[in-house]
Image (spheres, rainbow, N blue to C red):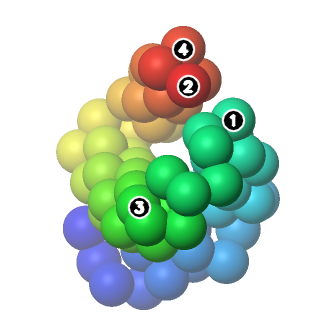
Amino acid sequence: MTRLRADALRRGKGLRLYRCLLRAYPPGFRARYGAQMTDAFVQLAADRRASGGIRALVVLWLRTIMDV
């Protein structure tokens, strides 16, 4: 994964959607772990996209949504 691709994900619609999903967690939890969770997800999403293409990214999103 390239740093450029990760930076693009940080600014994109995916990031906004992920941050919306984080609102399902209690405020204290988000305040403590939200930034770390977001960074980890952005990195994982970029890695999945680079190694498995769009299908791997869709699977990641489905699992993420089900987890929340």
Question: Disc 2 marks which residue?
Answer: 68
**Is there a contact, CB below 8 Å, between mark 2 and mark 1?**
yes
| Residue found farthest to the top | 66
Question: Disc 1 marks which residue?
Answer: 24
Question: Which is in the foreground here, disc 4 or disc 3?
Answer: 3
Question: Image point 56% across, 57% down: which residue?
Answer: 28
Q: CA distance from mark 4 to mark 3?
A: 19 Å
The type of residue carrying mark 4 is Met
Of labels 2 and 1, earlier in sequence is 1
Question: Disc 4 marks which residue?
Answer: 66
> Residue 64's x, y, as percent?
49, 28
Quadrant of the image containing the N terminus: bottom left
| Residue found farthest to the front | 28
Of labels 3 and 2, earlier in sequence is 3
Q: In the rendered image, is residue 38 in sight?
A: no
**Is there a contact, CB below 8 Å, between mark 4 and mark 3?**
no
The circle drawn on residue 33 is 3
